[in-house]
Image (cartoon, helix red, strand yellow):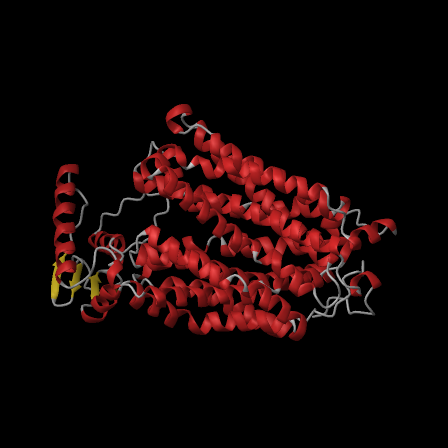
Amino acid sequence: MTTGLAAKGAAPAATRPMTREEKKVIFASSLGTVFEWYDFYLYGTLAVIIGRQFFSNLDPSSQLIFSLLAFAAGFIVRPFGALVFGRLGDMIGRKYTFLVTMLIMGSSTFIVGILPGFASIGVGAPTILIGLRLMQGLALGGEYGGAAIYVAEHAPQGKRGAFTSWIQGTATVGLLLSLMVILATQTLLGPENFAAWGWRVPFVFSILLLAISVYIRLSMNESPAFAKMKAEGKTSKAPLSESFGQWRNLKIVILALVGLTAGQAMVWYTGQFYSLLFLTQALKVDSATANILIALALVLGTPFFVVFGALSDRIGRKPIIMAGCLLAVVTYFPVFTALTRAANPDLAAAQARAKVLVTADPAECSFQFNPTGTIKFTSSCDIAKQMLAGASVSYDTAAAPAGTPATIRIGEDTISSYSAKGLSADEAKRKDAEFRKQVADTLRKDGYPARADSAKMDKVMIVAILTYLVILVTMVYGPIAAMLVELFPTRIRYTSMSLPYHIGNGWFGGLLPTTAFAIVAQTGNMYNGLWYPIIIAAISLVVGTVCIRETRDVDIYASD
């Protein structure tokens, strides 16, 4: 593959050293993007409380599910934001486009902080909330591409990787900032006040961050590459059709998605989101401890965004990104197994000593994924699997003769499941209580812990493992902004690079927790969810290695 952008000699503005004004521009761009990521991820960190406030008409399990679905809505619309704001960025300029996206993001976050809950305005509360999440997703779809391009088009030749890596670190810093503000507010107000009303403070606080960002960005100048192109009258009149209607460019968009951003997204979301979910859900670490451990790993790992960004200026973007994908493919299973031993050694010991086996008629077993909580599982197989999944217990399966009730074997103990078909509500409730107690008692007898014991955790090892996962994130993510910028010509760069980035990160990455959970629920093995990021990262590794050429010497001032 070729990009048609081979360097013919760098433009003077690209080779001279960075001026103080240009450094200010890069700082301002990074700071503004940190605040946007803070706004975007604040919701996810507070999903449980938001579920209680805006979906209080539902049971607790469904509250969380619908709250997370609203969170996912922001990811799903990101590619559409990329199209809308990418087109504007290529037509009217980088500066004003991502100024608009910042205003949309910041105001949406502030409104969440003052929005009445379900108890006050009924169904209007969740409806407005979802609308605000959609607006945030659209805004982020336009923000990232603009900020990355803006910085890259200011950077001197040979330093684009180093300077754009600051933008790459903003997502992690924004997540860390949201955790810090939440922890500080919880500490000052106390758990009860925070759950009742204090959760709104971090959202309302965002209005101050918005004011700072807008003030800084209003003082910034337009990107020199875009200004040069506009002065020459070479701006695109139809960036969407040029980007996606011409095979020469569409081919690069597809390759950028499959060979770069899809795999990068898998490594990013596994290292910084799925690892947290794995700690709290599979390993039963309390959320406060898990958040602190993740925060420490982020602090330790974040500087490597700049390290790998700068290194990509010397040895190339592609080798570092592909190495990150390769390490993820090869090490995820052993790394997460080690995480289990460090975070919940009792669980690891029980899994080795007393394996769990579900024996059932395959015809009775349904697909064990219920994202809305509305499916009622009534067969003995489904009830047994639901019980174990709810207790975060990994199990193997074996086929039983047709018509045979399912059984659960835990070590040397065997428990018969039951079918709820045809039972009255009271009888089904009684049977369920008896079955749950029998399974819970047997699991306890065989050493399966109800939650992780903080005194037995190897917290140093946990932080080391989590830091390794974050470093993989920095390998794939640190250099990728520069590489995406260099893949596309200036006249359609904003549109072309934003779409593959946000499909990769918004759809492939944003849906990783849900997809991984579905795999775990279906197979019964808590590690099997890792197959999703491993397979996608492996595909990107192969496609990227074979089909995508190195870009670090590309002349990004070329307009065609």
Please identify the quadrant where the C terminus is shown: bottom right
Q: Is residue 275 left or right of residue 36?
A: left
Q: Residue at x 71, y 63 (%)?
A: 486
Q: Position of residue 166 (x, y in %)?
A: 61, 58
Q: In which quadrant of the rendered view does residue 260 lie? A: bottom right
Q: Is residue 358 left or right of residue 321?
A: left
Q: Is residue 245 visible?
A: no
Q: Position of residue 386 (x, y in %)?
A: 25, 52
Q: In which quadrant of the rendered view does residue 548 lie? A: bottom right
Q: Is residue 354 left or right of residue 168?
A: left
Please identify the quadrant where the N terminus is shown: bottom right
**Residue situated in front as seen by the camera: 492 or 140:** 140
Q: Position of residue 124 (x, y in %)?
A: 45, 27
Count up the numbered dots: 0
Q: Residue at x 43, y 72 (%)?
A: 331
Q: Residue at x 34, y 50 (%)?
A: 288
**Residue situated in front as seen by the camera: 478 or 130:** 478
Q: Is residue 155 left or right of residue 58?
A: right
Q: Is residue 103 above or below residue 298?
A: above
Q: Is residue 388 visible?
A: yes
**Residue situated in front as seen by the camera: 514 or 143:** 143
